[in-house]
Structure formats: C-alpha cells, structure tokens
Amino acid sequence: MTEQTRLTLTPEPLTATAFAPYGTVIETRDRDFFMINNGSTQRFHRLAEVMLGKPDDRGIISIFRAQGLAMPLRVKLLERHPFGSQAFIPLKQNPFLIIVAEPGEVPEPANIRAFITDGSQGINYHPGVWHHPVLSCVPEDDFLVVDREGEGNNCDEYFFAEDTEIVLENSP
Ligand SMILES: NC(=O)N[C@@H](O)C(=O)O
Ligand code: NI
C-alpha cells in the first residue's frame, strides 16, 4: 500500500531572490534604468530574456484571459515548457498566484513552492521549470504572455497520483 502524501502550500511574497531557481521577476523596484526619448522615459532594459530552444523558434506575444479558480485549490497537475521560457505580465495590476518546482524528470512534491505577486510584478519561467497553469486571484484577469512557438511539443504535463493531495491555501 503506497503512503499518502498530503501537502499544504502557503504562498510566499514573490521576490527575485526566492524565485531565482525558477526564473526571473519582471519589476521596476530596485532595478537599473537609463533615460531615453530625450530624457522623457526611463528604460528598464532587458529585465528578462526570451529563451528559445531550437533554431527556427519564434518568440510570440499573446494575451491570456484567465478565470479565477476556486480556493483552496487542489493541485492536480504541473506543466513545463522544455523548449522555451514563458513570461506572464499582469495587465490589470492584480496579484496572481504561482506554483513552481525546479526542473527535473518529474516535480517532487517536497520541492513545490507557492508565491503571490504584489500586482506590479511579472515573471519569466525558465525552460523546463514545472509550474501550474496561470492562477488568477480575481474572477477574470488578463496577462500579457511572451513565450515560444516552434516545432515539437513544448508542454509536458505531470498529473499527481490520486493519493498525493496537494492543496494551495488562500494567500495570506
Ligand atoms: N498552455 C498554455 O499556453 N498556458 C500554460 O503554459 C500556462 O502556464 O498557463
Ligand atoms: Ni505554462
């Protein structure tokens, strides 16, 4: 008889340092900039990079209109994009939730972490990082998404066994 796994995830406030194993935080707080447009604009240059795995890949820009999910959330799957990064930038300045695990053959429940953004932050998942599909904190939210289009399957899904109960609590 396999032992049941029960895990409760409590979202941590998102910081660049804490998120570093999974990707980059896209924010202006404490970031360098230089002036452009005759001194009228601050350019926060290359906050993150679009990572593409194959020579003919394209970086594309989309908008995701996400419906909020009932909380607390039973986490049934995580997914990864082996051939490219994926960035989510909130278009309405709402906080959103993030569930991640470091790259590996399968996501290890003990290594899963949850974060909540402050509304001004976006993220760029690095290739192969396990993550939950976008999690809106409001009934409907819009995200600008920059990710990879190209040959081959770029979305691996991992479904947890029925006896692995992972629950994301409401944010603090
Ligand atoms: N599948 C898809 O385009 N979206 C997911 O990758 C996601 O992270 O929301
Ligand atoms: Ni994704």
Image (tube, grey):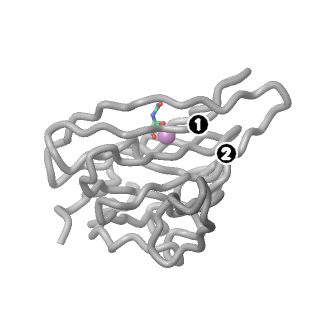
Find the residue positioned furthest to the top.
151
Residue 41 or residue 68, whichever sits in front: 41
| Residue 141 image point, x, y percent | 24, 39
Q: Residue at x 27, y 70 (%)?
A: 10
Q: Residue at x 43, y 38 (%)?
A: 144
Q: Could you say which disc has been placed on residue 147 in the image?
A: 1
Q: Could you say which disc has been placed on residue 119 in the image?
A: none
Q: Secondary structure at mark 2?
A: loop
Query: Label 1 CB, ligand 1: below 8 Å?
Result: yes
Left or right: where 138 falls relative to 167: left
Q: CA distance from mark 1 to mark 2?
A: 7 Å
Q: Residue at x 16, y 46 (%)?
A: 138
Q: Relative to 84, does residue 108 appear above or below in the rendering?
A: below
Quarter of the rendering occupied by the C terminus: bottom left
Q: Residue at x 52, y 58 (%)?
A: 41
**Sequence-first tag of 1 and 2:** 2
Left or right: where 82 falls relative to 102: right
| Residue 58 image point, x, y percent | 71, 28
Label 2 sits on what residue type?
Val
Label 1 sits on what residue type?
Asp
Q: Secondary structure at mark 1?
A: strand
What residue does disc 2 label?
50
Quarter of the rendering occupied by the N terminus: bottom left
